[in-house]
Amino acid sequence: MLCDFIFLDNNVKTPLYRQIYISVRRSVENGSLKKGTKMPSIRKLSSDLGVSKTTVTSAYEQLCVEGYIINKPQSGYYVEAQFDSVPIVTDNPFETAEENKPYFEYDFSGKSIDDRIINMNEWKRYVKDTLNRNNLLTSYGDEQGEPTLRSALQKYSLGTRSVNTNGESIIVGAGTQPLLYILCSLIGLGKRVAVADTAYVQSELVFSSFGYEIITAECDRNGVTVESLKKIKPDIIMINPNFTRLSGENMPITRRLEIIEYARNNNALIIEDDYNGELRYSTHPIPCVQNYDSENTVYIGSFSKVLLPSVRISYMAIPKKLTAEYKLIKHKTNQTASKTEQLALASYIDNGRIDKHLRKARRIYLEKSKVIVESIHKYFGDDIKLLFNETSLYVTICLKYDVDSCKMLKILKQNSLDIMNSDLENRELRLSFSGIEKEKINQGINLLYYAVKECKK
């Protein structure tokens, strides 16, 4: 039996036994290998492919476990499975989604950060030190988050964002969504929630799954208005006080206090999504809303852009009135954040590395923000209005004319330029400067300008 259907590539990371397994499985699934077909013996296949018998044995054993082939004693291996319909397969089973992702020379998508802000070798040392502590890694993680990390986060959040809380009221999770699921479990079903038009989109999915009525609150230059809250009468108010859509600026302290007063008087809970609140660099960070009302505000912070996007660690500080309820259900929840990364981050914070990291990040992002703002004004001139979202590391270009969005995006792709998801129907282009190299920003904006100009209606 010829074995040309078995595709091996020594240049990929996929183990050889896995490559044999995938090749045989695909041939069975697409009908190339019929039920009852005798497979090559382990000795013959290992000789023909130039691999060890152990490699072939491992592949055959996995195929047997899954029922693709069967081992008949004293006879050999035979194809056992038969598919009436052919499953959809890729041309190359060893290609991964990551390998197929297109590369953009001018990446304004915000899907990465500037690798200059973190000393990767230093971070790897903290992770490696944690991996060497076998006694800590041979047990499940704490459902609420590792105590050492929660203690470190209490000090960190107080120092950078003036969060008033303690380790017992902090919950750790792999991103904001898992934390919101826990929070909604505490709050209960069927609530009414008011969100700003720039709300965290994924939060709405969580709210919907709990049967919440989601209503967009009216906003002015200072953010969500109390007048709109009086109309909506929400049980929950979700805000990001670091950015107001109409002005691109912080929610001023007067508006924050107005919302707090409304929440107190109407028994409403505030959820403060303080996304990258500590990354403010052109102005001094304003204390978070939770600082002024820790009893009615849930604070949520994240390290996705502060540290590394791949380190999926977020944290939530809940009011004391919810802490007791949480302790009753915490044993029914699972910790979604890596225990290894939690412990590494705790050491990183306790040793003062995060402070140095933040200072460097603020300096680098300040430099890049100046370049992108200057480049946009240079090319677009008075044809646009520019909003600068400092903490989220992006700018919004508000055009004064319509563009053919499909044509424009096609031209951008041809020029190896990517942008954030934008509201093109409302003439808005969003550009992140978090991942693009500073030296490429000006040329990238130049290419964007000519693409927009060519697609002007």
Image (cartoon, rainbow, N blue to C red):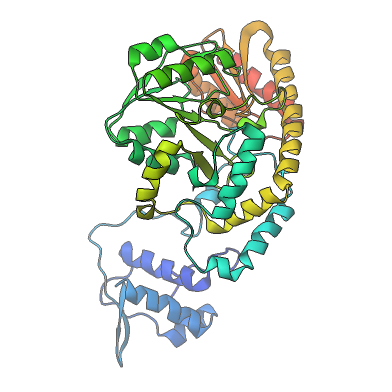
Residue 180 in the image, given as x and y percentages of width and height: 41, 38
- Looking at the rendered image, the quarter that the N terminus falls into is bottom left
Horizontally, is 26 left or right of 394 in the view?
A: left
Q: Is residue 2 above or below residue 86?
A: below
Query: Farthest bottom residue?
Result: 74
Residue located at (43% from left, 85% from top): 42
Residue located at (73% from left, 55% from top): 121
Residue in front for this viewpoint, 160 or 265: 265
Horizontally, is 81 left or right of 182 in the view?
A: left
Horizontally, is 309 left or right of 20 in the view?
A: right
Q: Is residue 9 visible?
A: no
Residue in front for this viewpoint, 93 or 195: 195
Residue 264 in the image, given as x and y percentages of width and height: 42, 21
Q: Is residue 39 above or below residue 118?
A: below
Residue 415 in the image, given as x and y percentages of width and height: 63, 30
Residue 83 in the image, given as x and y percentages of width and height: 25, 63
